[in-house]
Image (tube, rainbow, N blue to C red):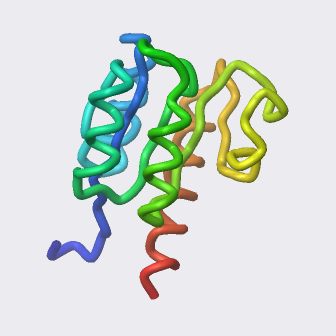
Amino acid sequence: MTDGVVRFRVLVVEDEPLIGMDIEDAVEGLGHEVVGPIAELEKALDMATNAALGFAIIDINIRGGHSYPVADMLLKRGLPVLLLSGYSEHALPERLREEARLPKPFTGAQLDKEIRDLCARVVNARR
């Protein structure tokens, strides 16, 4: 990294193709590598468990059920997550209510801000 910019591998868990593409474009537009988008719970959980990642952007409801186990695994590994949901934070399990959350629908500017915030959290945690 000769330009001094920190780049991350970002797990994207999203089962709506258009939203997944928007997230992928935003992540890559900020210079990061996308792992996904992944739409299936089991595959997402495998990646959350085994992949080298910086952080993750996770839709709460995906094919196969809620993605809570994916978020739990990433948090267990010490990786920050951004939860995407059309539901209020009170619909989340209590253990996830303090995590970063972006309500659907969201704008590109909101997503960019949240991605930058996650990057800053990772960089600060490494200091």
Residue 94 pos. (x, y %):
78, 44
Q: Quadrant of residue 47?
A: top left
Residue 27 pos. (x, y %):
37, 41
**Is residue 21 at least partly visible in the picture?**
no
Residue 24 pos. (x, y %):
34, 31
- Residue at 68 percent of width and 46 percent of height: 96
Residue 117 pos. (x, y %):
57, 58
Q: Quadrant of residue 39?
A: top left
- Residue at 62 percent of width and 37 percent of height: 110
Give the total number of marks visible in the rendering. Answer: 0
Residue at the left extreme? 2
**Is residue 41 at least partly visible in the picture?**
yes
Q: In the rendered view, would you say 67 is above or below 104?
A: below
Left-right relation of 46 to 109: left
Left-right relation of 126 to 86: left
- Residue at 25 percent of width and 39 percent of height: 35
Q: In the rendered view, would you say 67 is above or below 75?
A: above
Residue at the bottom extreme? 127
Left-right relation of 111 to 45: right
Image quadrant containing the N terminus: bottom left
Residue at the right extreme? 90
Nearest the eye: 34 or 30: 34
- Residue at 45 percent of width and 17 percent of height: 19
